[in-house]
Image: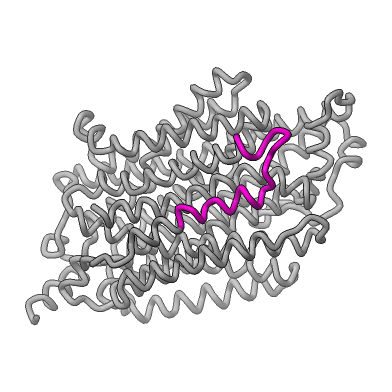
Amino acid sequence: MRLLWAGFVAILAAGVGFGVRGGIFTNWADEFGFSGAQLGMIGGAGFTGFCFGIIIGGLIVDKIGYAKLVIAAFLFHTISAFVTLGATEGQSTAVAFNFLYWGTFIFALANGTLEAVANPLVSTLFPNKRTHYLNILHASWPLGMVIGGLIGWFLGSGDNALHWKIQLALYLVPTLAYGIMFLGQKYPKSEASEKGLSFAQMFREVGYLSGGVVCFMLALFARDTVNTISGGGVMPTIAALVVGIGLFGFTLKITGGYAGSVLLFFLFIAHVLVGAVELGTDGWIQNITGVILDPTQGKILFVFTSLLMFALRFAADTIEKKAGLSPVALLLACAIIAVIGLNLIAAISGFGFALGAVAVYAVGKTFFWPTMLAVVGDRFPSTGAVAMSLMGGVGMMSAGLIGNVGLGYLKDRYAVDELKSENVALYEEYKSEGAPSSFFGIGEVQPLDGKLLEAAKGAEEPTPEQTAVVEADVRGARSTLRTDSLIPVGMAIIYLGMLLYFKKIGGYKPLTIAEEGSGSAAKAAAEHAGEA
């Protein structure tokens, strides 16, 4: 139980840092003049860095042990604070962007390394109640966001508001706590590790299908990283091709050309969508609802949603039993509820209605992440920590490369379209002179200037022009959420297909390696165990 709660506090530290960052996006836009796309890239680094920590950590954790990864994560968390706090008022936009981007990336690297420890650890500690205890473990994420939101609420506004640097540095408190809690602990081994399976044997059931999803996401990361460094041109595309093809070739070699589980492949695809809609939206929801209502109400809604998620994740086991739902049926129900919730948020016009709308959305997104991990642990024990960590990695990469950046682009795009349809001359006055917003080759758009937009929102007696700009931004935020709701529609289709599959084979149940089936990885595991 101490290991469970140490993992809980470690993920809590990640949530606090994430929650504070969500509240200081407007500070960064005002202080450094960032566009929505630039803020999205900084927020995205909070996910892409995570993927490296969880993927690399998940691949080596069974070999080097949990303790070394915990020490590495602690060091990364500390270093990230110094890098992020290097951004100073008066710096050029480019210099400040690099400090914030890489500081956020290192912070996320620490978070991912910790999850590479916590997820397989809890899955191993509670093999018969994975859904329940993984949901408890991940209840710390929304609790951390609550604390981060409250920091912004009480310490980030008003006449005596603390500087954003002080607010952000407070995540170091739970960081110190988890370091102490993990200190001197003894750790169990996964079932696959206990049976002596090699990395290649654990990876085989992942296969080149699911491995291809990981390669594709890493190729996107390489493209965006090179684009950030080089400023564009052909180099980002070349980097993506080299990384993607090279890693896929390595995947084919290590799997021996084995495709792997088709079910696991669809779980990976679903988790790409989970990362985009849950964490990608989390990175913007406070900002978007604050645009539609006002920033203070946006913070209240953010805290309320996170607190509700925290409470619900302790009830996952009860909900499954009372409603008679399998983990996959729970995921399907949540996807449908998330679609409804996002469309309700897009339609909010007052604070009371907004509370109900975000409550629906919170119920929908609460169980996605930990329950997906539980399904992998239940159905693919022969993969050890590998499949679970790789899937968590693609989810976080999706949040950073697709969800966060995509929502930033859509917010820029829809706001510009709304303003241009009403007054082209006013758009020309308010458009940014910086880099245009773009996303996956979709037409570039020159976004609104962040400083001018914030000035229009904060004007005590706004001019008609300022009012028009703010209203266009609000309509753009509504359209962004309606488009975002299409993602859980895709998830619902995948979960429905899985539900029908399990019904066909006699129902959902957790498996041991011996029971895992006729897949080559399971056979290899059984043969290896027999030889031992």
- What range is drawn magenta here? 154-175
Q: Residue at x 32, y 69 (%)?
A: 66
Q: Quadrant of residue 284?
A: top right
In the image, 488: left or right of 162? left
Q: Position of residue 357 (x, y in %)?
A: 51, 25
Q: Position of residue 491 (x, y in %)?
A: 42, 43
Specify whether residue 381 is in view.
yes
Total marks shown come to 0
Q: Position of residue 258 (x, y in %)?
A: 30, 73
In the image, 414: left or right of 189? right
Q: Residue at x 78, y 30 (%)?
A: 470
Q: Residue at x 25, y 44 (%)?
A: 132
The quadrant in which the C terminus is found is: bottom left
Q: Is residue 234 positioned above or below 148 on the image?
A: below
Q: Is residue 141 positioned above or below 62 on the image?
A: above
Give the camera-side residue of 320 and 134. 134
In the image, 312: left or right of 143? left
Q: Quadrant of residue 58?
A: bottom left
Give the camera-side residue of 490 and 78. 78
